[in-house]
Amino acid sequence: MAAVLPRYPQCTAGPGTGARSGPCWCRFSRTGAGERIENTMEAFENAVRQGCDWLELDVRRTRDGVVVVCHDRELWRQSGRHLDVTRTDFRDLPPYRSPLEVTFAPGSFSSGRDRRIPRLVEVFQRFPRQPISIEVKDDDDDLINEVAALVRSFDRAPITLWASFRQRILRKCRRAHPAMPFCLSLERGLLALLLWYLGLLPRLPLPEAALLFPLPSTINRTYFPLPRGPAGHALSRAAAALVLRPALLQHLKSRGLQVWLWVVNEERDFAEAFGLGATGVITDYPGRLRRFLDGPSPTPGGPSPTPRCPSPSWGGEPLPPPEKGGETGGKGRKVE
């Protein structure tokens, strides 16, 4: 099963199957953080086994110029060491803690054998045809250009999404690799919302491929953009009332955008997200999402969670055997 980006039809098509159409839903893993240690190769392999259509990951650049997959710039939460990724050489990066608390599931912990911070090139080598959303965490021209060069080397532009909350970063990403799809930034999202209420959104060009937005009911419960309390509760209610309007989401989908809600980790949240009209959910628990989608509809009259696409590669690509020896790019050349 795969979600479809009509503007970029190859974006979610399985290997060798061509573009798909229809109301298929997207399983989207946010670093696999709930079932294995976040942003590790073991976590990504688990997510692909569970049938995730997309992987979501974060990138930064080390002091010696290596693009690594890592969420936090300061590594205390993840490793117990006060180190800045961007001021540390790759060989000196510490291993992750195990167990490690899951950011969007407070009080829950994940563990695993793999505790190493991987390079982006390793992820591309292991999953050359797996769709991946890459959030660029830093406004760093060298980081952006390195990511773009790796995407070109592996010839994977149609299945690699630029992601960032900041329009300034996304503008640079688009210059570095214009052929890659990209998401709505916070600034562009707010503009689109304002124009929707003014009745002018149909006049706004929307070259973006996806809207990534938090599921409002998780705000002040598992996601805390504001301190826990009345302010967070008010933000949750406002986001639900103002942003996730069925007519607005339908308008965006009719214009070719995907609507992906994050971070959705519980069965009630899966049901709510798809009930709101999401085309995909971003989760820390790909196995839990798979069981939900494989089961019966959780609410009377609710949408069936099992509209399967016919291809056997609906969940991305089968895991290839690990490569031995040197690392090569998609064109067969050595990648340093």
Image (spheres, rainbow, N blue to C red):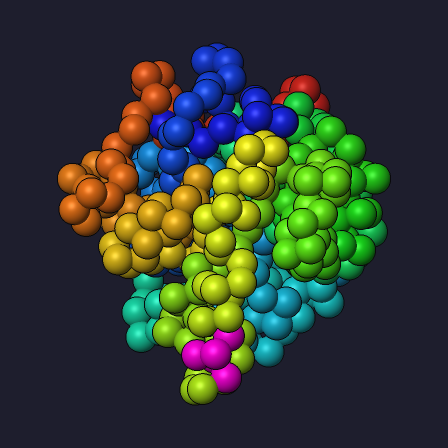
Q: Is residue 64 left or right of residue 12?
A: right
Q: Where's residue 297, x and y in %? A: 19, 42
Q: Where's residue 24, x and y in %? A: 38, 30
Q: Is residue 211 left or right of residue 176?
A: left
Residue 331 appears in which quarter of the rendering? top right
Above or below 71: residue 124 = above
Please say whether residue 185 is visible from this viewpoint.
Answer: no
Total count of labels: 0
Above or below 203: residue 270 = below
Front-lying residue, 269 or 31: 269
Please say whether residue 283 is visible from this viewpoint.
Answer: yes
Above or below 194: residue 329 = above
Residue at the spot x=38%, y=56% of the render?
A: 264
Front-lying residue, 183 or 84: 183
Front-lying residue, 300 or 53: 300
Check if residue 150 falls in the magenta segment.
no
Q: Where's residue 157, x and y in %? A: 66, 29
Residue 10 appears in which quarter of the rendering? top right
Residue at the spot x=29%, y=28% of the render?
A: 307
Q: Which residues are magenta?
A: 231-235
- Locate the N terminus by quadrant: top left
- Locate the C terminus by quadrant: top right
Q: Of all residues shown, which one is farthest toward the bottom?
A: 229
Q: Where's residue 100, x and y in %? A: 38, 68
Front-lying residue, 56 or 184: 184
Q: Is residue 198 left or right of residue 9?
A: right
Magenta-drawn stretch, dominant element (helix, strand or loop): helix
Residue at the spot x=50%, y=70% of the render?
A: 238
Residue at the spot x=46%, y=48% of the render?
A: 246
